[in-house]
Structure formats: C-alpha cells, structure tokens
Image (cartoon, helix red, strand yellow):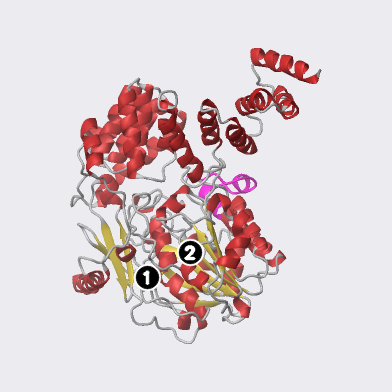
Amino acid sequence: MKFRSVVGAVGLALLGWAVVHCVRRLDVPEAQRTVVLITLDTVRADRVGAYGSTLGLTPALDRLAAEGVRFDRCLTVAPITLPAHASILTGLDPIEHGVRLNGAFALDPTVPTLATQLREHGYATGAFVSAFVLDRRFGLDEGFDVYDDRLANGGGAGDAAAKERRGADTVARALEFVGQAGDRPCFLWVHLFDAHAPYEAPAPFATSIADPYAAEVAYVDACVQQLLDGLAARARLDDALITVVADHGEGLGEHGERTHTLFLYDTTMRVPWIVWQRNGLPRGHVVQPTVSTTAVAPTVLDLLGFARPAEMTGVALTDLVRGTTSVAPPGAFVRIETQAPAYYYGFAPLSGAEVDGAKLIVAPRPELYEPRTDPGERDDRFARERGRADAVRRVLDEYERTRAGSRAHRHELDASDEQMLAQLGYVASRATPTERDPKDGVELFDALITAAEQSGSDPALAERTLRNLLEREPNVAEAFELLGDVQSAQQHWDDARESFTRAIRLRPKDPVLYTKLGEASLRAQRADDAKTAFEVAIKLDPTSVRPRMWLAGMIEATERAAALALYNDVVALAPQLAAARKGRARCLLANGNARLAEQDLRKALEVEPDDVDSLVTCGRILEEALRNPEAALELYRKALTIPSLAAELRADLERRVRLLER
C-alpha cells in the first residue's frame, strides 16, 4: 500500500493543493455537491429508535430515518471492523476483497472504492476515522485526499499507541475539512467508534443513562447531530446525500457473546442503514427485503448518477430506495462470515447466507433461523427443515465458487525472516483451524474478556484466570498474549517472554507479538533477543512505529547511523510523535548538526510544550551552538515555570538565566 503526500499529518494543510490537482473532471450534480458516509462502529439496529427501540437514545438517527429511507433488515458481511468497512467502501464481499480480519490484512490499492470513484468525478475526498483498526496501513486510504487517522495522543499514521479518539473530536476534524473545501464538491467519510467496548461515554451520557452501552449509543447519536449541525452551518446540508450505516452490532451477552467477532447472530450482524437527502427521496420510506452492506457503495454511486466500475460486484438498490419496487434486484445476495474463531482460537470459521427469509449459519453444527418471525434466533429449524437449509447452502456454495478471489495482501516472511524466526525458536506456521464449533467456546471467550477486564485493576488475578484457562485450552494465542501483557504489568519479564513466545508459535506472523517479545526481552536484559524480535516486527509490518522506536533507542549509542535511519522512518510515519523528534535530534546533535536538531526539538515542543528535556536541550543548542541567547533565554524561562523541574536542574537554569540577562 502506498502512502499519499496529501493524507494524514499533512492532509488538511495541503487540501488546497489536493482539490486543485487531484480532480480529474467536474461532473457533479449541483443538488448533490456534498456526499457524506457516516459509519457507526458497534451499533446494534435494535438500539435505534427507528428500528423499534423505545429507549430514546437516537433522536438524530430517528429524524434522518423519518425524513429519508431506512433499510429494515440490513446484514453486515462480517462482525469485524476492518472487513466490514472494506465491504462498505468497495461493494465487495470479503471473499472478493480478501480482508478477512482486523490487523492481519490490507486492502489491495488497485481495488476501486467509493472514494476513488468520487474523486474521479471531481469530489474532494476526506476520511476521518476514530480507531487504530482503520489506520491507513490497512489500505482504506486509497482515493482519499485526506485520510485523518491521528488519534488521542497526537501520534500520526502507524502510531499504535493511540487506540481511538472521541467522536466529537473526529467530527470537529471532519468539519475543518469541509470548511477548507470551499465551493468544491466534497465526499466525507466519518467513522464513529465510541459504541465499541470498553463502554466509557462522557458526561452527561454516562451519568444520565444507566446502561453503559446505551450511553455510548446516545453519545454517538449526539455526534451525528453535531456533524449535521456543522454541515448546515457551512451551507452543506441542503445539497447533501447522507448515508449512515453501522459496521456491525454487539452481542451484549446474548447467545453467550459479550462483544462481537465470534458468531453470526443478528445481535452482531443486523445493522442500521439510512439514506437521507433533503429532496428527491421518499420521506419515511422503509425498504423491506434483506440486503447486504456490499450494496452501500454501488447504491450511493447510482443515486448520484455515476456508473460503478465493473469490479464493484455489489448490487445498487436505487429502485428500492426510490420506492419504485419492493423486490430486491437479481444478484442482491446476502452472505455473512467470520474468520475470527479460526484465526484467533483454533475453532472452525463460520459463514452463512439469508435467502427468502431463511438464515443459514454454516458451522460444524449448522443452524437455520427465520429472523423475521424469530428475532432472537432461539428456534433453530435446521433439523426439521433440512431441505430448506440445503437449498440455501447450494446457493451459498455457488456464490462463493463464482466470487472467491482475494485481492488483499498480507505481510509475508522472506528467507532472512525465517532465519530470524529459527534463531528465536519459532516455527513459521499458525494454529490450524479445527472442526470445533465456536458455540463450544463460549466459556473460553468469556474467560478472555474477564481476564482483560481484570488486567487493568488486578493483573495478578488476571494471570490466575488466564492460567486456569490455558490448562483447559492450551492452543489459544490470544490467551498467551494477554498473559504476557499482565506479566509485563507485574514486571515478571522472563515469564512474559515465555508467554509471548508461546503466542508467536501459534500466530507467527503477528508483528505486535514480536514487538511485545522484544520489549520483555530488553527488560530481561536479553538485548540480542530483543533486537532480533524488533527487526522481525519491522519486517512483518513496514509501517510499524513502536518496534522502530524501541530498536532505535537500543542502538542509538553504538550504531548512530542506523538509529538515525530508524528515527527518520518514524518521523515520516508519525510526524507528530514527539519522542521520535527528540530521538532524531539526539542523533543529529551527536553528528554535529545543531540546526536540524533544534528544528526537531521545536517540532517536539509543538506537541509537548511543557516537556522539560526538549526545552532545556533546545535552549542549550541555541545558547552554545547557534549563538542565539535571546531564544535560549525564552526557553529557559519557560522551563523554570514547570513545577516538576528537578532542583539541581532548576539551579543550573537559574544560573544560566542570570548570565544571559546581564
């Protein structure tokens, strides 16, 4: 996946360039100058008022549905954020685009997306995502002039330390983009992650709504309203085509699943999908046939009057939206899947389809439901309606036979990588999926979630929970990884090394595991092992920041040129990461390049203005190397205002200030 010069950290500053130079042609319908895609992470359809909820959580979504078009029964392709979003943007099934899990795959940059097509038609394109799982490294940035994936800690692309940001902050960034687009036609994608666990809504939602998940849904709805108000204030609402869709739902304990990824029940698969336009669509119209989120991109393009590329196999549902038919068009097939049970836990993967009201879940013990009459999916009809189940399976098999052909890519190991693995004692294979039904793993999955909840407040208790689990289930990479995390939290470094090693034997192509192994090895005074682990992590994920930072810090004193190269990489990947700027400044200063070192420290201070180390070091460079006492004096005075300044350093700075003030 290539990086674009106009995304991420430099994106908004270069928007003016982007909308001038990236436009191929201007054939935008005047009434649809603004196209907005809002994706709601982890929002169940049945928590939205327009879908029958009586909790009163979603007035903004309810109003959009009342004034627009609502799809009554829309199923996501997978209960997993990255694959689901890949399908929303490409109009392809996961078996076609190949992105089957979070983190392990990246979308092929040649796959056409909604963004690539709208940019072809003259739209300035901006994406504003709220979670690391949609970081640009995973390929969804194609077609976007601006891809804003900077999260809570100010880090840039590839900075995995920041996991998510509040929806209000994401909306604010998106509205900046809209404002800077001027009169240009604009496509805006806003991703709101807040309803995802852990459920930690801000006040007043958390204090006024007892159910934490419901509070998050209410907060997400408020963010939608914030976006609508911002569009209206910028005269962008009346000419907008707005699509709101969730990527998946949430188990909330039903069918034994607390969150999502494991099962294919409606709790995680049925999602809200609403299309709104001020004029031109029937108000309050409800589409009844079951549809798939693979229809989102082709439907948007068709509503705009643009032909979709031949590779986009999803079916446009324009006639259903306009109300000119009540029958789904030919080819509007609804397939569902989850690979998570197989990849993470060694259980069987799940797939399924819904045909003529019958929903089949293909598993070692298959299930058949009729969700419209059995919304809780409690009445499994498979045994008594085997003929109906077989008919759905035949259609599913034919669909998969004609559609399969992955275009995603994964980070593969070359010969040198294999050698490094051998040095660490790992085999280049991962756990093979078995025919164990995920329904039999509910206790395992629940124990993992329990341990994760315990890890923050009581890591020793979490360790006991995980050890008990691993006695019963010894081949679960997730359990070993979490065990290594809680052992690291207790500074049991050798134990953590062993746990991460066991996890890698089960999942040997996961760069995060190698990074964690490297950190534990370094803490355990095993520098050679740490260096090897960090190098493998970088090979597996060329956009990774964390192992580069660790490795650069390790070798800075002895291999300065190599350390400088690593810091250069990190600054390119994460320009706002102050630690990278400071590390590069140290190397530059050691090489005698005081001017460039001062520039990096200035950049670090833009992010961390009260960082004593940067203030003092930059001041000394200005005083001693660059002969700029006035600028040095300003930084010293700033440092002296910081209460945490060490006494000895304070005395030295006070002495320097007195000398410079003479």
In the rendering, at what x and y percent does residue 84 appear? 40, 60
Residue at x 20% of width, y 71% of height: 390
Amino acid type, mark 1? Thr
In the rendering, at what x and y percent does residue 105 appear? 34, 53
Circle 2 crowding by C-alpha within 10 Å: few under 14, some 14–19, many from 20: many
| Label 2 – label 1 distance at C-alpha | 42 Å
208 in magenta: yes
Nearest to N terminus: mark 2 or mark 1: 2
Magenta part of the chain: 198-217
Quarter holding residue 394: bottom left
Query: 165 or 536: which is nearer to us?
Result: 536
Quarter holding residue 530: top left
The residue that label 1 is drawn on is: 373
Instruction: Please tell me whether mark 2 sits on a helix, a strand or a loop.
Output: loop
The vertical placement of 317 against 525, above or below, is below
Query: 178 or 120: which is nearer to us?
Result: 120
The residue that label 2 is drawn on is: 143
Residue at x 62% of width, y 25% of height: 617
Circle 1 crowding by C-alpha within 10 Å: few under 14, some 14–19, many from 20: few
